[in-house]
Image (spheres, rainbow, N blue to C red):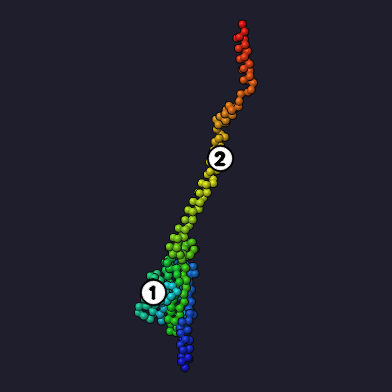
Amino acid sequence: MRSCIITGLLSLWMDLTSGAINIQLIPQYPVIGESATLNVTGVTGKILSFAWFKGPKTAFDYEILVYLPASPVSLATGPLHISRARPFPDGSLLFSDLSIIDSDIYTVKILTDKQVEEASVTLAVYGACGCSAGLSAGGIAGIICGTVLGIVLIVSATFLLYKRCVLPVTEEQREISNKKDDPLTEYYNVQTATAGFPNEPGSTYMALQYESQDKYSDLQP
């Protein structure tokens, strides 16, 4: 008897927590500044209340709002309330004027006269260029800083290679070109080379020969 009761309670709990509902994102690729609807479908029975949460958990700390159709005050806000989010009686949630910070997982928990159902959906907000804007401001700033740093490193490496390799070769070619274009350098080189040769051997002999003849003539009476 006890086992039958336990089995019945487990079956009832599984029925109450079964996730037959579904959430459709309309439009599928929402853009910053536009609107998007988290459209709930497949609800079984009459909705008594539902709550929306930011994130996959359904704890109170993540609650955005609670909607009670039969209550005079049908809407109650939670700790993570979003003023741009508006609920519909069928459990859906409308976001207006989408922002980057809206990109997240959203979970709905619906209580009907038959069961309790939950479902989650991922809302990714896209920029005007069509790229996902799901990154936080810090992530975008990090990407920009990394790109700038990479460009600076590339420029620095290119300058060092130019300074070490290309610049010395250019200076050497300039010096060679200056030497070829300077006529005084060639003149002094030729003069120095000519001055380095010794006098011809015959010049000294002839000088001695003429000098001896003069002395012999002086001695004769």
Sooner in the amino-acid sequence: mark 2 or mark 1: 1
Q: Position of residue 7 (x, y in %)?
A: 48, 88
The single residue placed furthest to the top in the displayed view is 221
Q: CA distance from mark 2 to mark 1?
A: 75 Å
**Label 1 crowd (10 A; few <14 / some 14-19 / many >=20):** few
Type of the residue with mark 1? Asp
Relative to 211, say whether 174 is above or below. Answer: below
Q: Indicate the secondary structure of the residue bearing disc 2.
A: helix
Which image quarter: residue 217? top right
Residue at image position (47%, 73%) is 121
Residue drawn at (49%, 51%), measured in percent from left and top?
Answer: 156
The percent coordinates of residue 163 (x first, y second) are 51, 46
Q: Nearer the viewer, residue 32 or 162?
A: 162
Above or below 178: residue 38: below
* Residue 173's disc number: 2
Mark 1 secondary-structure assignment: helix
Residue at the extreme left: 72
The picture places residue 218, in percent across and down from the top left corner, at: 60, 9
Q: From this viewpoint, which residue is outermost toward the bottom?
A: 1
The reply to whether residue 183 is visible in this rendering is no
Q: Which residue is mark 1?
A: 61
Residue at figure coordinates x 38%, y 72% from the top left = 80
Residue nearer the viewer, 159 or 60? 159
In the drawing, does residue 217 fall left or right of residue 52? right
Residue farthest to the right, as pictured:
202
